[in-house]
Amino acid sequence: MKHIVNTSWAGKMKFDTEVNGHHIILDAAEDVGGENAGPRPKALMLSALAGCTGMDVVSILKKMKIEPEYFNIRTEADLTEEHPKVYSKVHIIYEFKGNDLDMEKLKKAVELSQEKYCGVSAMYKKTMELTYEIQILS
């Protein structure tokens, strides 16, 4: 299977990328010639990671008959100082809220995503350190 994404220049530093029939505007900050009309490409890498693992976790928890009231994935990335500036480490924080959440089941769902199912995590682990933690918020 091949994925194809079309990305068209829209002037200055702006690009319109079409992914699965959906358009996303990418842009740079104003201080580097952009108009700040959309997210930066590297930040979207973190969003892709969160979305991939988040979908896995929700699917696995659903099979376990667990539905949190709140689920958020926060990704924090360390960027190198020199060019090309790349992420050297990414830390994922899985935040849950809800009644009677079983930490062992949450761990199992996150571990299955990270070790077996999330293709974005698997790709990123080949090039950077990837760590995670689980928090149950009150």
Image: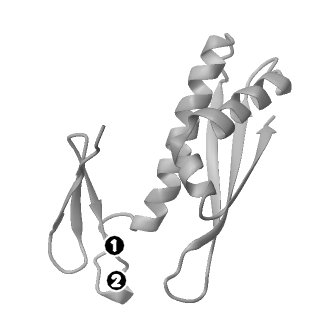
If the image is split into quadrants, where does the N terminus sit?
top left
Q: Is residue 115 left or right of residue 58?
A: right
Residue at image mark 2? 30
Looking at numbered disc 2 in the image, what kind of residue is underneath it?
Glu
5 up-or-down from 94: above or below:
below
Q: Where, by quadrant of the figure, is residue 41 drawn?
A: bottom left
Residue 33, given in percent of the width and then of the height, sits at 29, 86
| Left or right, residue 2 beside residue 121 | left
Query: Which residue bears the numbered disc 1?
Result: 36
- Residue drawn at x 53%, y 56% as measured from the top left: 46
Residue 27: x %, y % from top left: 31, 71
Relative to 99, does residue 11 appear above or below in the rendering? below
- Residue that sits furthest to the front in the current view: 1
Say which quarter of the image contains residue 129.
Answer: bottom right
Q: Which mark is residue 10?
A: none
Q: Residue 95: image x %, image y %?
A: 71, 40
Q: Residues within 10 Å of mark 1 (few under 14, many from 20)?
A: some
* Three-letter code for the amino acid on which mark 1 is drawn: Asn
Image quarter of residue 75: bottom right
The colour scheme used here is one colour
Element type where label 1 sits in the image: loop
Q: Earlier in the sequence, mark 2 or mark 1?
A: 2
> Can you say whether 26 is above or below 82 in the image?
above
* Position of the C terminus by quadrant: top right
Whole-angstrom CA distance, mark 2 to mark 1, is 6 Å
SS assignment at label 2? helix
* Relative depth, front residue between 4 and 56: 4
- Disc 2 crowd rating (10 Å Cα; few below 14, some 14-19, many 20+) is few
Q: Residue at x 46, y 66 (%)?
A: 42
Q: Are marks 2 and 1 in contact (CB under 8 Å)?
A: yes
Considering depth in this image, is 124 or 78 the residue closer to the camera? 124
Q: Kindly identify the residue that appears in the image at 65 percent across and 20 percent down.
A: 61
